[in-house]
Amino acid sequence: MLKQLLGGAVDEREEKYGLNWHGKRSARQIALTPSLGTLRPCPEDSVDWDTTQNLMIEGDNLEVLKLLQKSYAGKVKLIYIDPPYNTGKDFVYSDNFQDNIKNYLELTGQTDGNGRKISSNTEASGRFHTDWLNMMYPRLKLARNLLREDGVIFISIDEREYSHLRILCSWIFGEENQMGTVVWKNARIITQQTLQLNTNTCWL
């Protein structure tokens, strides 16, 4: 994996159990790339600036997670995230991580330069999940670095990406640390929360 991250050629070994998708190597590199941003205090927009023990940070979550690594690595007790569910719709934020079939087959080497299928048995379902996994991996990896040994991460998700999230969390946090899944029904929509604890702990 280290050789791959550094761009070197890697001999193929015996296959291992895991989750693979197009762009996984790049997603790992994104998690390791330092942020060029800076956290800037805003006392004029704050309440009780001199005495408060709370901190609210506004910004792109990937960049903020990177910036928090130096000061908060291994110190955070609890993280709760409510990532995009990949519904294909647009809310305040984009919730559509699906790639079009032509572009996906091209990116994954299943068609030639003229758009002709190289194989009659093409795999196309990854186009619905690949970009979502590429978005989630570096954020979860960075979040894990922030958690204390007894820290907890809660993740809300629905059935569209639940199975992928579960495998991703098992890979990043360790399957032995999963506590379970809480399923709740509200307005005919079933939402699942995943709780993931760090090294000596668990995820739900």
Image (cartoon, rainbow, N blue to C red):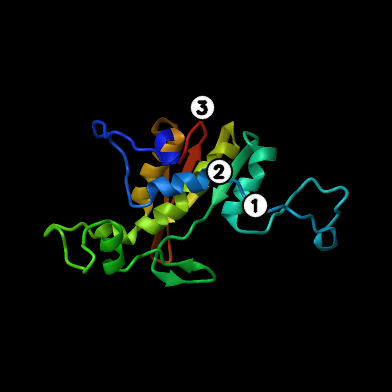
Q: Which mark is residue 143?
A: 2
**Are dots 1 and 3 in contact, CB under 8 Å?**
no
**Are dots 1 and 2 in contact, CB under 8 Å?**
no
Residue 200: % across, % down: 51, 27
Residue 127: % across, % down: 31, 61
Q: CA distance from mark 1 to mark 3?
A: 32 Å
Judge left or right: residue 141 versus residue 118.
right
Amino acid residing under circle 1? Leu
To which residue does mark 3 refer? 200
- Within-10-Å neighbours for mark 2: few <14, some 14–19, many 20+: many
To which residue does mark 1 refer? 36
Quarter where residue 75 is shown: top right
Is 14 rendered above or below residue 158? Answer: above
Task: Please give the name of the residue rendered at 26% of the width and 35% of the height, measured from the top-left corner.
Answer: 12
Residue 84: % across, % down: 47, 60
- The total of numbered circles placed on residues is 3
Amino acid residing under circle 2? Ala
Residue 170: % across, % down: 40, 38
Q: Earlier in the sequence, mark 3 or mark 2?
A: 2
Disc 1 element: loop
Quarter holding the N terminus is: top left
Task: Please give the name of the residue rendered at 71% of the width and 52% of the height, measured from the top-left corner.
Answer: 38
Q: CA distance from mark 3 to mark 2?
A: 15 Å
